[in-house]
Image: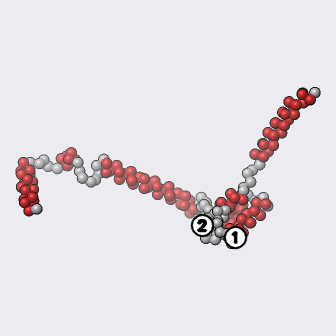
Amino acid sequence: MTRALRPVSRAVLVALALATATVVTAQPDRPTQQEIEESLTCQCGCGLTVHSCNHIQCGSGEPIKKEIGERLARGETREQILAAFRQRLGEKVLSSPTLEGFNWLAWVTPFAGLLIAGTVLTVTIRRRTHGGGGVPSPSRAAAGSPPVTDEHRARLARELDEFDRDA
């Protein structure tokens, strides 16, 4: 009789494990203390995030860490906590700019600069390699200039001889 119950009990245990996993994954992800600390810039002037601030007993970072812990204990979301700090300390407290208002330029400008620089570099290289400047090749010089006569060659030879004698 115990043999017959053994497969059933395994099936029940598997079903319970799956149900528990489903319930756990169905709950919204709660933010971690570190995640929020990484989203805020320490106000002591070090330029690091609250989590990364390396000042011992930092007068700015430690109170912020404590407040984050208290807010998480009350069940506040990441957005609520960040909004509270942003309202109290201003936009500068966020470690990365938001995509609202004028701040979108902070995200777009580096990419636009790279795109413009790449375009200018590409156009410049193409012009130089495909003949847009520099010393003209003999075939390009011959196409746009009058033909060279024997008189021109004789004059060039005379001037070069005079140049060699003077030097």
Q: Nearer the viewer, mark 1 or mark 2?
A: 1
48 left or right, relative to 130: right
User: Where residue 65 sits in the image (x, y, percent)?
Assistant: 71, 65
Label 2 sits on residue = 47
Of the residues shown, which amino acid type is indicated by label 1? Gln
- Of helix, strand and loop, which one carries label 1? loop
Q: Residue at x 9, y 58 (%)?
A: 164
Above-or-below relation of 164 to 27: below
Above-or-below relation of 57 to 132: below
22 left or right, relative to 105: right
Of the residues shown, which amino acid type is indicated by label 2? Gly
Q: How many marks?
A: 2
Disc 1 packing (10 Å; few <14; some 14–19; many ≥20):
few
Q: Nearer the viewer, residue 18 or 110?
A: 18
Above-or-below relation of 90 to 123: below
> Which dot marks residue 57?
1
Q: Residue at x 67, y 62 (%)?
A: 51
Q: Is residue 159 visible?
A: no
User: Where residue 82 sits in the image (x, y, percent)?
Assistant: 69, 62
Dividing the picture into quadrants, the one containing residue 64 is bottom right
65 left or right, relative to 141: right
Q: Is residue 145 visible?
A: yes
> In what quadrant of the picture does the C terminus appear?
bottom left
Q: Residue at x 67, y 69 (%)?
A: 56
> In what quadrant of the picture does the N terminus appear?
top right
User: Where residue 38 sits in the image (x, y, percent)?
Assistant: 65, 60
Q: Nearer the viewer, residue 67 or 77?
A: 67
Q: Nearer the viewer, residue 165 or 142?
A: 165
- Of helix, strand and loop, which one carries label 2? loop
